[in-house]
Amino acid sequence: MELKITNDYENKLLGRREIRAYAVYSDKTPTKAEVKEEVCKKLSMDPDLVEIREIKQQYGLMASDITAYSYSSREIMDKLFKKRGKKGATKEAKSGATAT
């Protein structure tokens, strides 16, 4: 897989780097784990603080647009995940209902 970084933006308000990349490959669409490994290797980042948000396959091509976030700390990453409802939040907690 050949990976080219197209945009690297430092979002200081959210404490993360927002990375856009373009990947070209000769086999199947790479998994998030494969893309994460390649992005971390290319930009020398900690894999524990990187989240691959999106791999958008281009129709008819062996290429994808990739969106990745690299957080400055584990606390910020966990806090933003919780707000999105990815970790630790149940449907009741998201809707505001309480169980009795």
Image (cartoon, grey):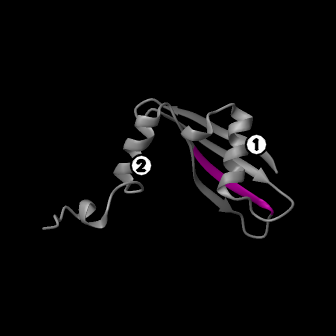
Q: Quadrant of residue 39?
A: top right
Magenta-colored segment: predominant secondary structure: strand
Residue in the picture at 49% in, 35% down: 16
Q: Is residue 86 visible?
A: yes
Give the vertical position of 82 relative to 76 (above or below): below
Q: Nearer the viewer, residue 42 or 46?
A: 46
> Can you give x and y, in whole percent of width and height, for residue 47 in the image?
62, 40
Give the vertical position of 56 relative to 43 (above or below): below
Judged from this view, the residue extending furthest toward the right is 26
Q: Is residue 59 magenta?
A: no
SS of the residue under disc 1: strand
Q: Which residues are magenta?
A: 62-68
> Can you give x and y, in whole percent of width and height, for residue 87 in the image?
40, 54
Q: Residue at label 1?
A: 4
Q: Is residue 65 magenta?
A: yes
Q: Is residue 75 left or right of residue 4?
A: left
**Quadrant of image for the C terminus:** bottom left
Judged from this view, the residue extending furthest toward the left is 100
> Can you give x and y, in whole percent of width and height, for residue 78 in the image?
41, 43
Q: As shown in the figure, which amino acid type bears the numbered disc 1?
A: Lys
